Amino acid sequence: MKAPEKPAIISCAVTGSLHTPSMSPHLPLTPDEIATQAIEAAEAGAAILHLHARDPLDGRPTADPSTFMAFLPRIRQATDAVVNITTGGAPGMSLDERLAAAERASPEMTSLNMGTINVGLFPMASKISDWRYPWEKPFLEASRDGMFRNSFADIETIVQRLGKGHGCRFEFECYDVGHLYNLAWLLDQKHYEPPLFIQFCIGILGGIGAELDNLLHMIRTAQRLFGADVEFSVLAAGRHQMSMATHNALLGGNVRVGLEDSLYLERGRLATSNAEQVGKIRLILETLGIGIATPAQARQRLALKGADRTAF
């Protein structure tokens, strides 16, 4: 197979909100740890940094803008990477809570989840016997009877408040094929203009499975709906991370790694940092003859407003 002509954009999701501290000692929890690992990931080749925040006292997910502002300026000062702030937040957060940090920081990019799904975290609880904090097990078990809400009204609100209000562009997170049609509706209603950056989120319990046939179907559906030149990326949960990222890059797409999506570097071996995962996927891609996009190239391809127009 001929190597894709466009360099691949590497995104790194640094901490997320689904893994808990007991799962890995390397998961960044404090603002200092998040900043350090984000900067190291950028130095390793990540053009985009996808960021959540955690309570520094016990590592639980937080939407507090002041916690985000404890690490965002440091990242901005140390690297040219694109900062992409979550609007997904964590289970149990209201939409206003999920948008608070992005409205405070006015980043170049935020995530935008394209539909309501079940997110089953509860199977992970059975694998842990020694809990660092009392909140972790109930948090995971609650997903058995919870859902990740992203209604059409929620999607419109995010586009209005962040897209039109702050000039943010979006990482459209699609956990199933129907989410691509939700995105097509968004464009049909003139709520958003291309270029698009679509993130296929595969392997989450409640979403589409991490299988090559499913990835191919997502890619072909996206290209049919949005054109052959659409920018697409993939995050694959857990053990599927590196293999699915490699497949996607060979098919002309971009990749996402990071401790939000997988705590491991390979079977049975925890990743010691986000940079370790970025370094591994970069080595794989370069070995296959695929170039690595710079932050400047990512900004140009995704029509971002520039770091100088953020509020941090």
Image: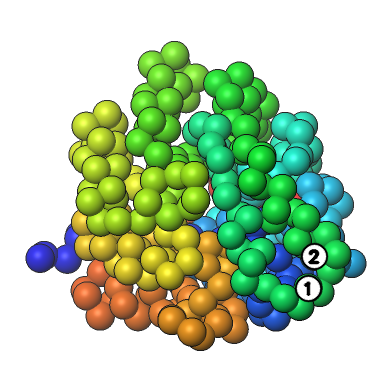
**Secondary structure under the numbered disc 2 in the rendered image:** loop
Quadrant placement of the N terminus: bottom left
The mark closer to the camera, 2 or 1, is 1
Residue 131: give its label: 1
Amino acid type, residue under disc 2 in the picture: Gly
Residue at 23%, 51% in the rendered image: 213
The extreme left residue here reads: 1
Residue nearest the viewer, comparing 234 with 67:
234
Residue 42 screen position, x and y as percent? 54, 70
Q: Is 218 located above or below residue 294 in the figure?
A: above
Residue 115 pos. (x, y %):
51, 32
Amino acid marked by disc 1: Trp
In this image, 107 relative to 132: left or right? left
Which quadrant of the view contains residue 305? top right
User: What residue appears at the point 63 percent right and 55 percent down from the top-left corner?
Assistant: 122
Q: Is residue 173 above or below residue 130?
A: above
78 with respect to 65 (left or right): left
Q: Is residue 154 left or right of residue 229?
A: right
Upstream in sequence: badge 2 or badge 1: 2
Can residue 214 be seen from the camera position used here? yes
Q: Which residue is tagged 2?
A: 59
Give the structural element (helix, strand or loop) at label 1: loop
